[in-house]
Amino acid sequence: MERIAALVVFSFRSGHTGLGVGGWLLALGIAWAAYRARALSRSGALAAWVEGGVLLGWGGWAWGVVLMAFFVPSSLLSRWAQARRHVGIEKFAKGSQRDAWQVLANGGWPTLMVLAQHWGWLDPELAWRLGTAAFAAATADTWATELGVFHPRPRWLLLGPPVAPGTSGGMSPWGTAAALAGAAWIGLWAAILAPNGPQGRLLLTVTLAGLVGAVIDSLLGATVQGMYYCPTCDKETEQHPIHRRCGTRTVLRRGWPWMNNDVVNALSIAAAMLVAAWV
């Protein structure tokens, strides 16, 4: 039994051994496939290759598994939802094809954790906990956004007055349940592929951190995110300087102009990592 246990622990640890040049080549193939599938723009594919190269080449295949656990379901869900929803879509700053800023906002923090681990600044277990918490927050936010917009009567920060579907800061039971499911999905992979073998406690930690990150994303969206107004459509939108639906120039209605959706994502993911570090 001791030999079996040692073999299991070794197999998980080997998942955190960098793949070197092979990891960078594998990341290049994945980024190219995502670009061909129109899940990534050209700039998004380049950013994804760099992130994937670091995660696989210097982090190991376990990091690649968590990356794909975030990216593949989230991309498929975004494409499915965008093809079916008829409300709220004109509010979103971007479509289902991720550009470089979106890729960096969602995957930049885990990439930095792997770099910190590679250079000896972070213990592998702490880097794994923080990095997977970042992926959990990104997944929770994506799933909540794509599914929550279908709820007919979302509320401002869940308990406030009703708001239109797709409004930044709007929350619904559907979106909250989707956020919890997304965070738990990444938490499961984080627990299974932990450096020293499966850890049930890590599932709870990463899930909690991911859910908190999604809530903070909604809070920032409701308060300080830059939101614009289209005079032609008479609608609030994240899109600037042009409203894609009608081509009209949008004007700032509330929030800070520099606080766009990508900045909100990066900050909420950082908050999730702080929660994981504290827990």
Image (spheres, rainbow, N blue to C red):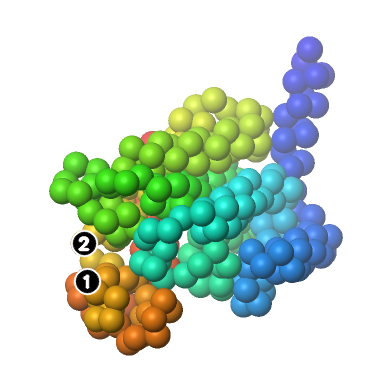
Residue 273 visible in the picture: no
The percent coordinates of residue 16 (x first, y second) are 70, 45
Q: Is residue 251 left or right of residue 32?
A: left
Which is more toward the observer, 130 or 125?
Answer: 130
Q: Residues within 10 Å of mark 1 (few under 14, many from 20)?
A: some
Q: Is residue 234 left or right of residue 195?
A: left
The percent coordinates of residue 199 (x first, y second) are 57, 27
Q: Which mark is residue 181?
A: none
* Image quarter hosting the N terminus: top right
Which residue is at a point 24% across and 43% down the rendered structure image? Answer: 158
Where 21 sits versus 153, above or below? below
Badge 1 amino acid: Gly
The residues tagged by marks 1 and 2 sit, at their Cα atoms, a distance apart of 7 Å
Badge 2 amino acid: Thr
* Image quarter hosting the C terminus: top left
Which is more toward the observer, 162 or 211?
Answer: 162
Q: Dot 1 corresponds to which residue?
A: 255
> CB under 8 Å between callouts 1 and 2?
yes
**Among the two numbered marks 1 and 2 on one chain, the one whose residue lies closer to the N terminus:** 2
Q: SS for tag 1?
A: loop
Which residue is at a point 38% across and 39% down the rendered structure image? Answer: 174
Which residue is at a point 24% across and 81% down the rendered structure image? Answer: 231
Where 40 sits versus 67, above or below? below
Q: Dot 2 corresponds to which residue?
A: 223
Q: SS for tag 2?
A: helix
Count of marks, rendered view: 2
Residue 86 visible in the picture: yes
Q: Quadrant of residue 263?
A: bottom left
